[in-house]
Image (tube, rainbow, N blue to C red):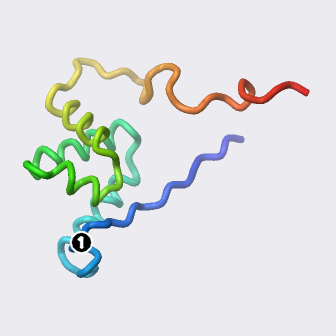
């Protein structure tokens, strides 16, 4: 049986959440991270890309602090939202992407 990796919800590292953990902004950031936690890779990218568009100038940097995602991931998501492809494939990763199978990596004894 295949075990699934357990991810935990990211804790925001912005200055506002650190100094005022019970503020409205901190609650909003926790809600964003709870939603992102439930999404797969593609939808996580698109959701954060949409947020970056809404937040405008400086949104990518602020979302990096809030979500813990990389700058390239957020920018790629923003581009996917602005310029959607006609028919996205059923795959989430490109062929060959991801971790190699254990059977390929280990030698047969």
The image position of residue 6, as x and y in percent, is 55, 54
The image position of residue 93, as x and y in percent, is 44, 28
Q: In this view, does 34 lie to the left or right of 17?
A: right
Residue assigned mark 1: 15
Q: In this view, does 106 lie to the left or right of 66?
A: right
The residue under the point 75% across, 27% down is 103
Q: Is residue 98 left or right of residue 32?
A: right
The image position of residue 1, as x and y in percent, is 72, 41
The residue under the point 37% across, 21% down is 89
How many labels, in total? Answer: 1
Question: Is residue 29 positioned above or below 35 on the image?
Answer: below
The residue under the point 50% across, 26% down is 97
Please tell me whether mark 1 sits on a helix, a strand or a loop: helix
Question: Label 1: few (<14), some or many (≥20) within 10 Å?
Answer: few
- Quarter of the image holding residue 84? top left
Observer-nearest residue: 6 or 17? 17
Question: Is residue 33 positioned above or below 87 on the image?
Answer: below
Quadrant of the image for the C terminus? top right
């Amino acid at each position: 049986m295949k075990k699934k990796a357990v991810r935990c919800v990211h804790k925001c590292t912005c200055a506002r959440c650190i100094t005022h953990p019970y503020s409205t902004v901190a609650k909003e950031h926790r809600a964003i991270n709870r939603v992102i936690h439930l999404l797969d890779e593609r939808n996580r990218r698109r959701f954060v890309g949409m947020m970056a568009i809404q937040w405008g100038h400086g949104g990518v940097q602020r979302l990096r602090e809030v979500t813990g995602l990389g700058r390239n991931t957020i920018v790629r998501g923003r581009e996917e939202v602005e310029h959607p492809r006609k028919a996205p494939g059923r795959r989430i990763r490109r062929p060959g992407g991801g971790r190699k199978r254990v059977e390929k990596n280990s030698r047969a004894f």
